[in-house]
Structures are given as structure tokens and as C-alpha cells.
Amino acid sequence: MVRMPAAALPYYSIGVDLGGTNLRIAAVGPEGDLREKIALETEVKEGRERVIDDMCAAIADLRQRMGEAPLAGIGIGVPGVINLSTGMVVNSPNLPGWSDFPVRDEIERRLQTRVMLENDANAAALGEKYLGAGKNVSGLCILTLGTGIGGGLVLDGRIWHGEDGMGAELGHMTIDPNGALCACGNLGCIEAYASASAIVRMANAAIRVGRSAGLTAAAEEVGELTAEMVYIKARQGDRVACEIFEMVGRSLGVAIGNLINIFNLPLYVVGGGVARAWDAFAPELMAEVEKRSVVYRARRPRIERSALDTDAGLLGAAWLPQLDRSRLQTAHNAL
Amino acid sequence: MVRMPAAALPYYSIGVDLGGTNLRIAAVGPEGDLREKIALETEVKEGRERVIDDMCAAIADLRQRMGEAPLAGIGIGVPGVINLSTGMVVNSPNLPGWSDFPVRDEIERRLQTRVMLENDANAAALGEKYLGAGKNVSGLCILTLGTGIGGGLVLDGRIWHGEDGMGAELGHMTIDPNGALCACGNLGCIEAYASASAIVRMANAAIRVGRSAGLTAAAEEVGELTAEMVYIKARQGDRVACEIFEMVGRSLGVAIGNLINIFNLPLYVVGGGVARAWDAFAPELMAEVEKRSVVYRARRPRIERSALDTDAGLLGAAWLPQLDRSRLQTAHNAL
């Protein structure tokens, strides 16, 4: 009887998006096709052990669902600075108690498989490059607009980590030296103009001075404004809400114009939850880049909304082991 | 009789710094040691043929002086965008009439040796990396402060060219969205605050409103102010001249703070003629970077004045063929 060796089945891999609020886990096939997905809450307050328990249980569940197919490995996207050689989280404000703990080794030990850590915005950049908007380009830059703003760079097909894994801190680019105060202590970071928190801050400021009856009514209705509600008001024609998104667009235009002059890449991607308001800020973004960037005017690179939406980081994390496998194979074939 | 093969003599290479005003040519040994140097004026007004004639004659002269030593090739630094595959200048405001002419092939034909073109600021980055301040690092970023501001990036030992050779246009990073008008048409580029022309512009503005008797007297003495004269006045304690260099430093601090957040490199170099005023602007530069860059505060990368001064581009151009030779050798040895 001829028995198919296990390796003849196509490899799949598992990605984890370990956010401060949501814990999402997905299984992805060798073409980047999403096979299974689990969404949990990250019980950050219950401590690191609890979160790792939950994560490992969900991964075991996914593996069972995938049956006999061989697993290439697990990629985990983490909102913080990663030390790639030790597999530890160096610094993550959203995951208190995770610093200087051997996350990668612990999960490898528990699950008996290969684990790779990556910064979440870097994982999103990788996701867009290999499975999203960037399939046909050699490199790209992504800004993920969430509560804060993350940045990721893929140069010549690889994530740019910088000397200490702190590369691509694009959210803290100064775009107005005397501008709004950012959480990092600087004045005028792009994060202080184009993140969900910045949108809420600008909306609340307008409410305080009585500039927008529409936003005031919306805030009274729900108690606390969200960026999504400001977007809904903009779609309904509220002038102040529209102006806020115009500011988001102009600010992104300054930042992306700088990035175009610095990198001369073929593609710049805007991702994260705020990117869903693309129609409200994109026209100002494009006009600003046109005005500001000499390289944009000469080469007209693509500037696009994320193709993978808020799954970019999850799919990118899942793709890490597959990419590594295909690179090892290429290196092996070249021997 | 045993005869030494010619290849046993150490290779040397020739670098050309083809500026809009000065044409400088140097021979460099295999350790990056400067052997011979020729300085001419670039007779731009006489046309391209004349400049190429002058350059080739000077190179022939240098080769004669170097005797029997074998030549690894010629590197030419050009103030403009280069198409590396065709060896043509795509765009160079300082060299009218040079676009879309096969510069590399023409000089190769005339001199019967290998010629490599490179953007002048990229060549300066390469010079600092291999022969200057960056000998012990894998990558660096340079800003060359001259009439304008050029930028160069060495990532993992190689020049970052971007998709079309337009990467590292660092001089046109917006550092103040409503700031001074730049030659590129944008408002608030770093070039409009920290170049020699920006220094002269700020000094003349102070003179026009009668703010500085010292600068006014200096301007009257010579007819036309230079950045160097403003620096001399600053050294003599002129308050307005000092303030101008403080503005240079703060502006560079915003730009370099952004670059540190983006790249997380170990070294940032300030070069070009204006870098000679380092003591007048460096304290403000450092204070501003400290305030602005979260990655600077975490990692404290080096920020230094160019070690090669205004020879960085010339030596970097000369190093191009040597670097290429050593890479070919490494690749060959690996076969």
C-alpha cells in the first residue's frame, strides 16, 4: 500500500493578532487563503499567563479543525517593540507585564512548533505586500491608523526592522513642529492628527466651543464619541465633521509626501480602522501630496487604502512562517 | 625569471565630483587612501562636450601619475537623478544639456575603462560609510548641506536608490507645513531652513528690517553675503547671526528626529559646506532631536558631523568601483 507522506499535503500556517483588546487567530493556506478564524477578547487584566493560555487553547482548536495538514509555524503580531533574536517583547504599553519575558520560547515549548514574533504594523506591511495591495511590487510603506498610528516598511521584499527593531515608527513623524501634543511627548506628530483618538479629540474640541450641533447631539446620544461616529456625521454632511477628515487628509499628505521623497517606493498603503473613512480624507491627502512631494510629481507612485482592511496584521503574521519556509527552500535549492 | 603579474599590484580607482561649479578628480588606493587630487572649474556654460573633454583629460593625467598600478574603474558623482541601468542623467538642474545623453557609455568609450555614475549625495553617504564616520556601522543617513540639501542612505551596506533612483530626496522633507517657500515649490522643506541659501535668505531678511548692524556692515563690505560670513558673525557673537544658526539646528533636529523614527539607524551624518558651522547649530540640533524622537530617546544613535568634510562625495565616488570589485570577488569566492 502506498501511503502519501505528510509533507505532500500543502503546508498551512497560523497567525495571531495579539491586540490590547482583541485576540484574533487565523489559519492560512499556502496561497494566503484564509481557512479558519477565531476572535476572542484579550484578557489583559487577567495577566500574561491567562492570555497565553487562551491563545494556546485557541491555536490547538484551530489545529484540530485543520486535520492532517502539516503546520509551517505560527506568526504572532504584537503591538510593541520585539527583540527578534531573543523572541521577547522589549516594550509594549498595551501589554503590561510582557516585557523581558521569553514569549516565543514559552509558546514554542507549549505547542511544540515554530513560533515567530513580529511587530503588528510590520506584520500588516508584510500582509499587504504578499497577500494584499502590494502583490506586484518589491516594496511598500504602510501607515495603520488605529487608536495610535503604526508604521511598517517592506524594502526589497523584507521588513525593515532597523538596528534595534524600532524602525518604521512612522506615527511619530513630526508634521507640524508647533502642533498638537502627542502621547509620546512631542508636538505635532502625525498620530496627533490622523489617528482615531486624534479625530475624537478634534471633535470634542469642536463640541466644547459649540461649533457643531450635529456632533454635540451625537455625543449626547451615546455618552462618548468615536471616530466612526464622526465619520458617519461627515457622511451626513456635517461641516465640522468633514473639516476634521480634511485635516486628517492634509496631515497624512504631509507625512506620505515626506515618505515618498525619502523612499521612492511604488506603493504607500493606508490601513487600520480609520482607513474605512477613506472617501472622507483621500481627496485632501492626494491634493497635499501633489503640492508637497517633488518625487510624487515626477513618479506618481500608488497611494491606496489597505486591501486587507483590519486583517492585514493577522494575515501578515500568518504569512511569516510560509515566507520563511519558501526562503529556506530557495536557499536550499541554490546549494 | 619570475615576473609579478600586473594584478598583484593593488588596484586603485578614480573618483569624480562633477559639481555645477567645481570639477574635482581624485585617485584612491585600496584602503581608501587619497593618492592624487585635481581641482578644476566645471565649464558648464561651454557645454557638455567641453566638460567631458576636461574631465577625460584630467583623468588621463591622473592615470599617468599613478604609473603601472591597475585601475579598478571610475566613479562619477553627479548632482541629479541617475538612471543606473542606462548610465544616463535623468534630471540635473545644475547640468543643463546633460539629460538623456549616455554619459557613462561615452566616457567608457573614451577612456576604455569601467565607469559608474552615482548621485552626488548618495556618493557622499557611501564615502562616509566606507571611508569616514560610518566605518563600523552597517548603515547610515547623511544630509549634505550646500546651496541646497542633498540626502543619502546606506542600508545594510548598500545605497538605497528607491524604485527610480529618486530615493533619499531628504532635502525636501516638510518640517513646517506653513513655512518658508522652497525652490521645489513646497512650503517648509528642510532645504528652506538649513541650506547655505536659506542662511543667506534669513540674514538678508534680518538686514532688510534693520535687525542686525553686524550683518548689515558685513553685507555692505562685500556686496553679497555668504553663509560663511554669517557664521563668522555668529562666532563673533552677533545675536541675530547666532539665532539664524539656532534655527538651522532646530530645523535639522526636526528632520533628523523624523529620520531616526523612520530608520532606527546607528548613525546620522551632517555634511556639506554648512556642516563647518557645526558648533553654531549642533547644540540646538541635539536638544530638538531629544525632545522630538521617541526612538532617539530609547537608543541614542550617533549624530555627527561628516568625517570627510566636503570630500565625502569625491571619495565615495572613487570607492564605487572598489566596492563593486570586492563584492564581485566575494560572490566569486562563494561559488
Image: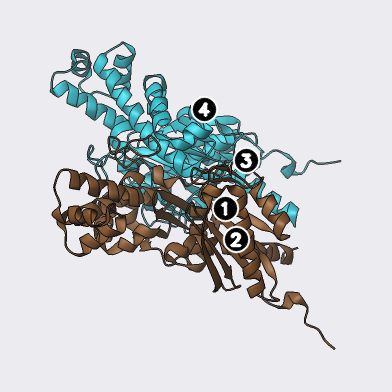
Chain colours: A brown, B cyan
**Mark 1 and mark 2 residues within 8 Å of each other at the beta carbon:** yes
* Distance from Cα at disc 4 to Cα at disc 1: 36 Å
Q: Name the residue under label 2.
A: A320
Q: Nearer the viewer, residue B303 or A71?
A: A71
Element on which disc 1 rests:
strand
Eye-nearest disc, 1 or 3 = 3
Q: Which of B5 and B215 is in front in this view?
A: B215
Eye-nearest disc, 4 or 1 = 1
Are marks 3 and 2 in one subunit?
yes
Question: Label 2: chain?
Answer: A
Q: In which quarter of the image is the N terminus of chain A?
A: bottom right
Element on which disc 3 rests:
loop
Q: Nearer the viewer, residue A27 or A266?
A: A27
**Mark 4 and mark 3 residues within 8 Å of each other at the beta carbon:** no
For the point 23% across and 52% down, which residue is it?
Answer: A244
The amino acid marked with disc number 3 is Asp
The amino acid marked with disc number 4 is Ala
Q: Mark 4 points at which residue?
A: B307
The circle drawn on residue A118 is: 1
Q: Mark 3 points at which residue?
A: A100
Whether residue B121 can be seen here: no
